[in-house]
Image: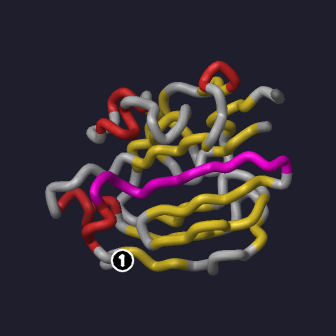
Amino acid sequence: MIVAAPLAGTVVGLDAVPDVVFAGGMVGPGAAIEPAVDAVVVCAPAPGTLVKLHPHAFALVTVDGLGVLVHLGIDTVGLRGEGFEVLRAEGDVVSAGDPVVRWSPADVRARGLSAVCPVVALDVDPSRVSVLPSGVVTPGDPLLEVAPE
């Protein structure tokens, strides 16, 4: 199973995310993306169903049953949706690349928060997850490969 980059930016390891829960792999294995531009449309990283959708984060379950979380910035839940525009609804079936949320990493950074975006596989043994690229990605580029059980 391939999980695509949901936005453009530079791939960083989860250990570089300024949040102990993500950096420690407690949410799940994966990677993070430091957004490349000031205004971003975040896309579905795989085909599936949006099972949770908040302005600052969303989770989907792929057609293969894999849970994937995309979190937009760190500590952004405290913004209560300000600066985020939700483009889909919880329960929507999406294709990889479908727009889900529009937001401004520049606005998040201006508030003193990190705009880095963790992308993690949920409930998966870390040995099954490989981070594919390093450096710069664009939306739709392969980001994670999750091996079958």
Which residue is drawn at the image coordinates 45% and 36% (left, top)? Answer: 26
Q: Work out which quarter of the rendered image holds the N terminus and state it.
A: top right
Q: Residue 17: give x, y in percent of width and height.
A: 33, 37
- Magenta stretch contains residue 74: yes
Which residue is drawn at the image coordinates 15% and 56% (left, top)? Answer: 112
Q: Residue 42: give x, y in percent of width and height.
A: 54, 62
Q: Residue 27: give x, y in percent of width and height.
A: 48, 41
According to the picture, the residue beneath numbered tag 1 turns out to be 81
Relative horizontal placement of residue 91, taking residue 21 as reference (left or right)? right
Q: Residue 101: give x, y in percent of width and height.
A: 52, 70
131 or 90, nearer to the observer: 90
Which residue is drawn at the image coordinates 47% and 62% (left, top)? Answer: 57
- Magenta stretch contains residue 16: no
Which residue is drawn at the image coordinates 70% and 24% (left, top)? Answer: 128
Disc 1 residue crowd, few under 14, some 14–19, many 20+, Cα 10 Å? some
Q: Work out which quarter of the rendered image holds the C terminus and state it.
A: top right
Task: Give SS at disc 1.
Answer: loop
- Type of residue at label 1? Gly
The image shows residue 87, relative to residue 110, as above or below, that is below
Magenta stretch?
64-75
86 or 121, nearer to the observer: 121
